[in-house]
Amino acid sequence: MTTTGQANDVSLDVAADLAAQLRVDSIRCSTSAGSGHPTSGMSAADLLAVLVTRHLRYDWDDPRSPLNDHLIFSKGHASPLLYSIFRAVGVVSEDELINGYRRFGQRLEGHPTPVLPWVDVATGSLGQGLPDGVGVALAGRYLDRLPYRVWVLCGDSELAEGSIWEAFDKASYYELSNLVAIVDVNRLGQRGPTDLQWDLAAYAERAKAFGARTIEIDGHDLDVIDHAFTEAASHMGGGKPTVIFAKTIKGKGFSEVENKNGWHGKPLPPDMADRAIAELGGVRGLVVRGPLPSPAEPGPPLEHPSTLPREAVPQPSTDWPAYKTGEKIATRKAYGDVLVTLGARDPKVVALDGEVSNSTHADEFEQAFPDRYFEMFIAEQQMIAAATGLAVRGYKAFASTFAAFFTRAYDFIRMGAISGVDLRLVGSHSGVEIGADGPSQMALEDLAMFRAVHGSTVLYPADGTSTAALTEAMANTSGISYMRTTRGAYPGLYASGEEFTVGGSKVLRSGPDDQVALVGAGVTLHECLRAADILAADGIAARVIDCYSVKPIDASALKAAAEATHGRIVVAEDHHPQGGLASAVADALLTAGQQNLHLTRLAVRGMPGSGTAAELLAWAGIDAEHIANAARLLT
Amino acid sequence: MTTTGQANDVSLDVAADLAAQLRVDSIRCSTSAGSGHPTSGMSAADLLAVLVTRHLRYDWDDPRSPLNDHLIFSKGHASPLLYSIFRAVGVVSEDELINGYRRFGQRLEGHPTPVLPWVDVATGSLGQGLPDGVGVALAGRYLDRLPYRVWVLCGDSELAEGSIWEAFDKASYYELSNLVAIVDVNRLGQRGPTDLQWDLAAYAERAKAFGARTIEIDGHDLDVIDHAFTEAASHMGGGKPTVIFAKTIKGKGFSEVENKNGWHGKPLPPDMADRAIAELGGVRGLVVRGPLPSPAEPGPPLEHPSTLPREAVPQPSTDWPAYKTGEKIATRKAYGDVLVTLGARDPKVVALDGEVSNSTHADEFEQAFPDRYFEMFIAEQQMIAAATGLAVRGYKAFASTFAAFFTRAYDFIRMGAISGVDLRLVGSHSGVEIGADGPSQMALEDLAMFRAVHGSTVLYPADGTSTAALTEAMANTSGISYMRTTRGAYPGLYASGEEFTVGGSKVLRSGPDDQVALVGAGVTLHECLRAADILAADGIAARVIDCYSVKPIDASALKAAAEATHGRIVVAEDHHPQGGLASAVADALLTAGQQNLHLTRLAVRGMPGSGTAAELLAWAGIDAEHIANAARLLT
């Protein structure tokens, strides 16, 4: 039997046939590839067969349609099932499925990534697809205001990840009734039974306590599944996300592996695959699609929950904030200022923060555009995931917290890069400069962490003008971009209107007889300038470079400085010595073939405690006096 | 009134007086410092006054006593309260409290760290103290088997962190009735009201669903508080952790700031402080202690929940596993083997894993020593925190997962370094070498991430013998040590008994006429060896260095190689180009003053997909052919 074209009337008999095909194809593609997770797809095949034929509103010929529902496999290892669906709806050929899966240079990768047009986000690191789905659902409810639904297939094992509970918390707080999580409770993880095994009631109690509506079902009874999805979809305006806990059997459909430990992430050997396919009724060629989305216009603006009183704010200005040279301003404040301008100029700009918006100054944006600001409370993983989901729907999300706390979400940032989304991340309170709060609040690994992310951009401005310009640049930067801001206020260095480009730098002091170059960024740039004054008093001419773009870095300016100074360079950074600014400088100069190189690296090498910024910069050996001393030793 | 010495009979009247003193002192020290979070301590002062005078069994003169209860401030920003307690029990002077708090070079840091002998772990990144407490409680129940209790003061804001729910999940799974979380529900976060505000019932429903026993109280009624702690302590064998949700008022005790937004993280200005102190009855000098722990012997062994059937295993051998040169073995397998040997030799060795123990081979340890293995399921943050808590009690914890998934716990690893604990972390399945699973499972940032951690050690062995030796070395390494293992099996390079030291390297090929040096580690070392063969066939002599210790790195061997080869070095690494092996090599050579340096860095620069290991190493340009080509270009 073959049904083609999209229809609303695919019967459950056809869905049952499809489920068998999805199981067979999950086995075929993974056995052919020699790796993969067929049994993790077989447990969810009935759920997905009903979903894609009767509930998921999706135009497979137009995956970019804003009206489409979203389908996210949070359990990304069930990729054989997802790709078997793609074959069943006719967008991937049988040949590609069987011979392309997990092969080099092919798009049907081991875990789904958006190299496939029907995949929103990369999954495979568990506990991320649902938080990402929260972001898509936020966009759907409050920004797009379109009736699409977000269906997320979760594994039961991944419910051990705290990020899943951050997601439920925010989904209920933001009343995301357009979000449906389908949890495939197949009882078995990779190495054995899960914590809660088949205790659906215990799972449901947790989800309910986190504000979700829950439905417990037999995940292999198509009628029951169908009713559950209808029920989930019928409460779209009810203010609660829905979680369907489906009791399933891992490896369902092939008696030799059903509910047996030891079959996670293993393809069936060819002889077993043959027996499995026979038991499942053989290879099929069903092509079947479910309902299309109905045409819709964006609904009226919807105020979202906000616990801050909204002050009456004047119409935000579309003029760039102007900062004067010499006037002290914290770069975090400049970030807040310019974010408002960006918001006024581009309705796609949105902001998120992790309950520190009055420190990062994202609160300026919240006051100006309350409907485009999403408070994520202290849940940095969900903050990045929400930004990812918002980016999936085309929004330019800026997410901020203390720079140190992005370490909490490194896995999400890494996966964001694999998802190919554009994320703008801004971390305040970096380095020992923060002073009295002590090491737990001091970002000293962030530059290394962000530099190592694929395709990332890392910026670290030193004054208001450069912060404003680079924040604007981030709005137009693809991939993961990160800006480090500083707690304290420092004098403006650049007149308003000065231009800054990603990959650029500024030479703030230079002369024909420069004997040494001082390279700084952010707070250490101010120390470099002061060091140059100290050195000048000693008759030593020092070039000073503002290396505000740490990645990409301005190799030509650095090379020119090295050549002018016979390779004498001092780099000072408020960061651990590994992987930060000095590493970037060294990498650039070595790559540029610089031979004669006397590079002194001043960085935070000890474990800091509390103190004033000045005390700690001196203690770390990255203040003007230490920079000047290091320069003297080189000259 | 002054009560000295430890007693069981401190009255609630004295506790009330103490509570006022704690508030006054929280104000005094933070006003004097000009920063800090007095209002966050004032909300919890009644809770802590009752706890330390009547329930916490602690010998303040012997903080290392194994019998002591543990007190962890998960809300580390309430440090003024904690330090005021230290004054009240007589271990910190009034002068140190008032004039030392948050000052440079002093031990009363902005957030608590174990530079203080009464502090177990550094806190300040929220959502970590409770998970750390789970680790201490695991040690207490299953390893120490002593009747101490773990009391953790949590903030309400931090309940938005998923890690808190990972902690409750594991606390109930492991039946940690020796754990009591006290949640100071003061309704106000840093920038405004929390998600759930004073909805104690909603909080309690969540904690109950996660398996905890819950008690809801008025956090300012001393009688009620006292009963709650008695109740908590009376269920120590009941198999459930207890969570006390206390409704409190932020800034309680000073009417001008009580329950007012905008007073988070702000000291009172001196005039307000004076009024507050007056309202609270003035400065006090109460010195009072609570009960001492009773003498106790370790209880009988207690089997912990384990969902894997325990196979009968022979007595584990204390002999080091021996590997032969040329025989293929995966380094992850060698790790599992030697972990068993370490366990047989040292009862303090324990292991944890994130539900992938059959991949990391930690399952070998689980089978051999089920009572010293803690399955953390897919909760990497809690895994690191549990290891931290176990380390607090002196256990040598090895924690393993896929290398990529340590990114999930970077904030916990960073805080582990600040806590000064020894953590042994082992990440398998690193780099593109893993092949078909695709980029979500490929650690390509881990070397950069771990190198940037303060005081860390980073190891990356290439064969069984070196893995065994370096795993043993980790057992005796302080701070955060990390070992990267490889998925595939590669030939043994070293005979059993060969010695490997942290900071060392091995020169595997060398001669008097070496024209170029090839530096690899792990999988790329095997490619370097093959490249050397290719080059030898071309008549090019290549030195090959096994840089198994990435941090610290063997600068002298690298320097010698650079000198021998006129600075011609090729580094190949299965990692992004930033912050990994090549950066470590470059940093070492530049620091060593190497001038003539032609360093070619081969690393993973694109976004990988699926494929075989060989295909992906070739695609990334880090296989033998690419290494040989790069070497030819240098010579």
Image (cartoon, coloured by chain):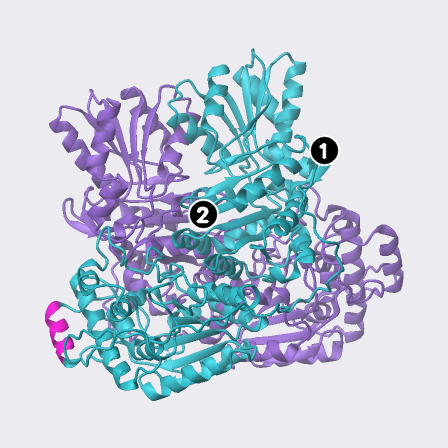
Chain colours: A cyan, B purple
Q: Is residue B209 visible?
A: yes
Query: In this rendering, is residue A152 above or below A592?
Result: below
Extreme-bottom residue of the structure: A223
Closer to us: B427 or A571: A571
Where is the C terminus of chain B found, in terms of image quarters? top left
Query: Residue at the spot x=17%, y=75% of the render?
Result: A284
Is A634 magenta? The answer is no
Instruction: Please tell me how many numbered marks the rendered image carries.
Output: 2
Closer to us: A382 or B446: A382
Q: Amino acid at mark 1?
A: Lys
Query: In this rendering, is residue A531 above or below B308?
Result: above
Judging from the image, mark 1 belongs to the subunit labelled A
Closer to us: B31 or B198: B198
Q: Is residue B437 left or right of residue B541?
A: right
Q: Is residue B263 left or right of residue A267?
A: right
Q: Residues within 10 Å of mark 2 (few under 14, many from 20)?
A: many
Query: Residue at the spot x=62%, y=57% of the render?
Result: B118
Q: Which element is circle 1 on?
A: loop
**Both on one chain, marks 1 and 2?**
yes
- Report the disc number at residue A479: 2
Closer to us: B182 or A279: A279
Q: Earlier in the sequence, mark 1 or mark 2?
A: 1
Query: Residue at the spot x=63%, y=75% of the render?
Result: B244
The quarter of the displayed image where residue A251 is located: bottom left
Q: Is residue A187 visible?
A: no
- Report the disc number at residue A324: 1
* Residue B549 x, y percent position in the rendering: 35, 40
Q: Is residue B255 left or right of residue A333?
A: right
Q: Residues within 10 Å of mark 1 (few under 14, many from 20)?
A: some
Which residue range is magenta in the image? A270-278
Q: Which element is circle 2 on?
A: loop
